[in-house]
Amino acid sequence: MKFLLLVGGSQEAWAKLGPADWSANERAHGALIAQVKQTGEFIECGELNVTPAGARIVRTENGVTSNSDGPLHGGENFASGYYLLDCADIERASAIAAELYESRFAPIEVRQIGA
């Protein structure tokens, strides 16, 4: 089954991180990517633009399309990255999510793709 892990972010939480924290974050992501590649669960991952100016909401109503600034879910927390995984079940995907460095200070949403 495929799962999307949406990595939460917060400008306030990131402001508290020092250089050593950012280095630890990079090492943790590198190790996790290597692990899930080895198990065959890795499909892809990436960072998302973390400034609201980089997001757009598109709606079409009665054939008329409108655009507005995003992100989709406003507020302090926003999606800052993602992992796309192929795992046996949501428990395994959740276990991987718990290994993300950001899970210490931001929510990680785990969603199954498809039925």
Image (cartoon, rainbow, N blue to C red):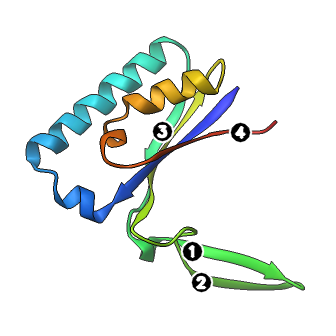
Is 41 on the left or on the right of 60, as rendered?
A: left
Residue behind mark 2: 68
Residue at left offset 44%, top offset 72%: 75
Residue at left offset 88%, top offset 84%: 63
Q: Which of marks 3 and 4 is in front?
A: 4
Amino acid on which disc 2 is placed: Ser
Relative to 64, residue 17 above or below: above
Tags 2 and 1 touching, CB below 8 Å = yes
Judged from the image, the secondary structure of the residue bearing numbered disc 4 is loop
Q: Where is residue 12 in the image (x, y as percent from the top left)?
A: 25, 64
Residue 56, numbered circle: 1
Tags 1 and 4 touching, CB below 8 Å = no
- Estimate the spatial distance between the alpha carbons at disc 3 and disc 4, rounded to whole Å: 15 Å
Residue 113, numbered circle: 4
Amino acid on which disc 4 is placed: Ile
- Estimate the spatial distance between the alpha carbons at disc 2 and disc 4, rounded to whole Å: 26 Å
Residue behind mark 3: 45
Judged from the image, the secondary structure of the residue bearing numbered disc 1 is strand
Task: Return the disc, 1 or 4, that comes first in the chain's sequence.
Answer: 1
* Quadrant of the image containing the N terminus: top right
The quadrant in which residue 41 appears is top right
- Estimate the spatial distance between the alpha carbons at disc 1 and disc 4, rounded to whole Å: 22 Å
